[in-house]
Amino acid sequence: MSARKDNTAEAPATARAETRAVKVRFAPPPEERRIDLPHLLDLLVKEDFLSRRQAEDVLIAPRTERELSQHPIEIVASRDYENRKQQGAKLDGETMAVWLAEKVGQPFVWIDPLKINVKLVTEIMSYAFAQRHEILAIEVTDDIVQIASAQPWMHQWEGMLKQTLRGRRIQRLIANPADINRYMLEFYTMARSVSKAAEAGMEVSMVTNFEQLLELGALKSPDANDSHVVNIVDWILNYAFEQRASDIHIEPRRDKSNVRFRIDGVLHPVYELPPAVNAAVTSRLKILGRMDVAEKHPRRMVASRPSARTVMKANCDCRLCRQRSVKRW
C-alpha cells in the first residue's frame, strides 16, 4: 500500500475493488469447463512457465487430503517452482491468476479486505452457494455486483444468481483462488456470528468482524480472561501484523467503539465493537501490558511494552498507550 500525503486522512470503509485491465488472448470454450490440474499444467508448459518434467512431477505426485479440495493453481503454487519466464521469481498463485485473467479476457483483482463491505457482499449469496461454485462477491452497488472467481469457464451459477440480484449486472473478475477461499470463510463466519447476535437481541455494529470469535448471544458482559476475548485480542494483533499496521487505535464511543489501523500513515476504519465487547478487549490489553485494570480515567498517558507472538511464529514488540480522549465541542 503506497504512502499518502495527508497523514490525517481516513480511508473510506468501503471502496470499489482495484482491477487491472487485460486484453483478450482467446475466446472461452462454448461449453462449461472446469480448469483441472492436467489442463492447467498443459497450458503452463505451452506458455513456458514450467518444464514438461516439472508438470509430470506435479501430475504423478500423491495428493494430500487438503490438495484434493484445492484449486489446481493452489496445487502448483505449493510446489514453489521458479518462474521460467521471470528469472529469480517464483511461480506463485497471484502470478498464475494474473496470467489466467489475461488468457480469458477478464480483469484481475487483488482482494483487499479493508475495502470490502462484508455485510453487503455476504447478502448476495449463501455460503453454500459461494463454496459450491468457488465464487466470492467483493463489491455491491446499485447497478453492478463484482464477483471474483478462478474458474472463468463456469457460467451456470450466473443464471441462478441473476434471479436474486434485482436487475444488477454481474461483473466477473479473476482472483487468486487462495485469497477467494480464505476470505470466503472469514466473511461468512462473521456474517453468521452477527446474525446469531442479532437473534439474541444484542445490539451489534453492522461492520464488525470480531463477533466471529465471540458467541455474543451467550455473553452479556464478557470477562477479560474469557477464552473468546483472548482470541479476539490475539486476532487483532495478528491481523494488524499481517496488514503491516504501525498503530492500532481502539476508540470508545457512547454506542460503539471504533477499531482503526494506521497503515502507511493513513487511518483505516477496520471494525466497530459493541461497548460490552470493547470493555473486555480493553481490559485484556491492559492485563497484557501490566497496567492497572481498575483505573478508568488516567490523568496522564500511561504506557507499557507487552510482547506478542504472531501466527507466523514471529516475535513482535508492542507499545501500549492509554490516555484520556479529547472531548470535541
Image (cartoon, rainbow, N blue to C red):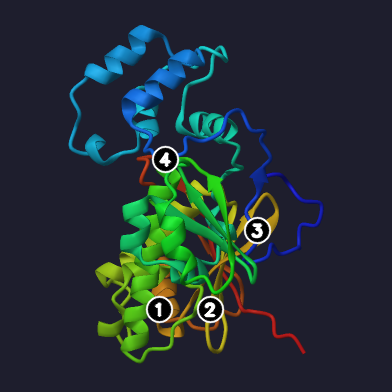
Q: Which badge, 3 or 2, is on the more N-terminal residue?
A: 3
Label 2 residue SS: strand
Within 10 angstroms of label 4, few (less than 14), some, or many (20 or more) residues? Answer: few
| Residue 27 spot, x, y in % from top left | 56, 33
Kind of residue at disc 1: Val
| Residue 213 spot, x, y in % from top left | 33, 67
Say which residue label 1 marks: 277
Kind of residue at disc 3: Arg
Task: State the separation of the CA atoms marked 3 and 2.
Answer: 25 Å
Q: Where the C terminus falls, by quadrant?
A: bottom right
Q: Is residue 21 above or below residue 208?
A: above
Q: State the residue in front, 130 or 297.
A: 130
Within 10 angstroms of label 2, few (less than 14), some, or many (20 or more) residues? Answer: many
Kind of residue at disc 2: Ser
Quarter of the image for residue 280 reads bottom left
Kind of residue at disc 4: Glu
Say which residue label 4 marks: 31
Say which residue label 3 marks: 16
| Residue 50 spot, x, y in % from top left | 43, 14
Circles 2 and 1 in contact, beta carbons < 8 Å: yes
Report if residue 165 is visible in the image.
yes
* Left or right placement of residue 106 versus residue 326 in this view: left
Label 1 residue SS: helix
Q: Where the N terminus falls, by quadrant?
A: top right
Q: Which badge, 1 or 4, is on the more N-terminal residue?
A: 4
Which of discs 3 and 2 lies nearer the camera? The answer is 3
Task: State the separation of the CA atoms marked 3 and 1.
Answer: 30 Å
Q: Residue at x 39, y 28 (%)?
A: 77
Report if residue 315 is visible in the image.
no
Q: Which badge, 2 or 4, is on the more N-terminal residue?
A: 4
Give the numbered dot on residue 257: 2
Quarter of the image for residue 267 reads bottom right
